[in-house]
Image (cartoon, grey):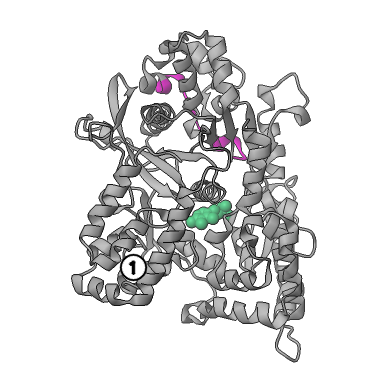
Amino acid sequence: MIQTGQQDLLRAADDLAARLPARLAVSARLAYNYRWSWMSGGPDVFRDVDPYRWSMRRENPIRLLVDSPDDALIEAAKDRSLVARAEAMEQTLKAELADPDATGSNARPIVFLCAEYGIHRSLPTYAGGLGVLAGDVLKEASDRHLPMVGVGILYRQGYFHQRVDTSGWQHEYWIESDPDRLPAALVTGPDGQPLTVMVNLWGRGVRLQIWRVDVGRVPLFLLDAQRSDNDRMDRWITARLYIGDRKIRLAQYALLGIGGIRALRAMGIDPAVVHLNEGHAALAPVELAREAMVDGRSLEDALQDARGRTVFTTHTPIPAGNESYVPEEVSRVLGGYPMELGLSEGEFFDLGRQRPEPDEQFGVTVLGIRMSRQVNGVSRRHGEVTRALWHGLFPDRPVEAVPIGYVTNGVHVPTWMAPPMRALLDQHLPPGWIERAADPATWEPVQDIPDEEAKRVLQAVFSLKLDPHVAERIAFLEDYDMGMAARLVWGCDVWVNVPRPPLEASGTSGMKSALNGGLNLSVMDGWWEEAFDGQNGWAIPGDSSLDVATQDLQDAAALYDLLEDEICHDFYRRDERGVPRAWVRRMKASLRTIGPRYCATRMLDEYLGRVYELT
Ligand SMILES: *Cc1c(COP(=O)(O)O)cnc(C)c1O
């Protein structure tokens, strides 16, 4: 495990513990590692301190413990059950942290680079699916004791909130987050001062500090330019995720890619593999090449070497989703960086061009593909779409032979499965099933769960539905985040997803719903194109050869036909004991086929076997 910054987190936890009643010191230590968020009963040890404050503080355990009045804390410290549960969790965590790495204790780590991470709703570093997937990868790597390190950015105004007023107008607002109230600590050097690295942007140095957040055994290092020694404008580069201003966004990508590699060096970390999750960090392998040239390697050797270490996952299915910049924009942001590689600006721009032509833009996806030894899309269908999209980069090959594969996304089971569902499966699947979630045999006993029982548990999960709001036909949900996503996938009978193919590169929400007994009703696109088998949900054809208007009409007709003819029929048809047999049969088929295929365990198996190829 990576030690750098560990002491800094321990110190922060000790500082918090010192402000709490002695018996709650254990809660302070738990709060500084997100492992609690996917332990059975984990959130409860914080919620039980003060349920109202817990929800008002976005389930942030640091804010809960810092903001709770003394009498509430003293009361909680008297709760023997709460303290005993927290102590047991700490023992589990300590034991996990003390275990050796799965690949040998001196293994160099897999470095995962991404612009966003969805770890938990209390950490405002994500916008949507890309981030949640990245978070699920880190958690799964932690469960499997893989030597992985995440690198990203700490956005001070990470959360974009959404509110709809009574006239239906949507308002957006940002809330500033205070890193001192996150389970994060600045990584310090031997002199006790924050460790920093420099990246030159628009001709001046921007200094980055590094926060550490622990996700089980996996450290997530978040870069931050908000320092008083930076130019006033430069402090804001890392303020907002996917900021609209193009030059600031490109500057963020430069900080993530170039600054990310420099931060690793400053912490003494030498990556075995650099995994670019999307093109935002595609300057990282360029920086690896630059380093090798400083060490005296030739440009060719250095590029070769960087490619040998880099793998790239693309998530975008359409050309417009792949960001590109005109050469002048790149020059303005990166300044003399190309020269440090001994490249003319033209040669540097060509790294990000499909058919090197002077007026072609510099694309981060092209750069990622050119600088990686392995490239993959995120579903079988998306693999095909991606090969066609980037055929121009491999003009000598037929489109089927474009060297871009796929690893279909999967979701982290302990994060996305509702506690009652987890308890039901704990009862019926073999012990330790969650570690063998990718083995179809693990899920077979689902077949034998008595129908009445699959129903009782679901009633418990679905009791949410008694909420009077659901009586209305449509509800618009404001402020979607991981907390709301969890509640939706826990309590939903049918998950409807109607993208226009091939816009859904993979999609993961339907997987989360399936883990909780929900049935998918989706257009044949992304993951559903490979998962649907006729028995485990319902499919809408989604013929992408038609024009959009005809396609929409056909899909809408198919959707309503299915709802009327099959879905309502099966849902409301109960036997004399009140069990909808046909529905339960489909639920079991869904859980048995989707559980083992679309879990993060299978996804990481494939990354390890086909993409990382650790030696
Ligand atoms: C799972 C999730 C997503 C991704 O949904 P897709 O189906 O992959 O588009 C986005 N946001 C949140 C908060 C999620 O939990």
Residue placed farthest to the bottom in the image? 576
565 vs 195, nearest the viewer: 195
Up-down relation of residue 327 to residue 160 (above or below): above
Over which residues does the magenta segment extend? 316-330
Asked if residue 183 is among those painted magenta in the image, a careful observer would answer no
Residue placed farthest to the right in the image? 534
The residue singled out by tag 1 in the image is 54
Up-down relation of residue 388 to residue 239 (above or below): above
Identify the image quadrant of residue 260: top left
User: Is 391 left, or right, of 354 in this rendering?
Assistant: right
| Residue 581 image offset from top left, x and y in percent | 76, 80
Identity of the residue drawn at 41% across and 32% down = 256
Quarter of the figure that contains the C terminus: top right
**Badge 1 amino acid:** Trp
Identity of the residue drawn at 56% across and 10% down = 300
Count up the numbered dots.
1
| Residue 543 image offset from top left, x and y in percent | 75, 50
Identify the image quadrant of residue 493: bottom right
Q: Secondary structure at mark 1?
A: helix
Asked if residue 329 is among those painted magenta in the image, a careful observer would answer yes
User: Is 607 left, or right, of 67 in this rendering?
Assistant: right
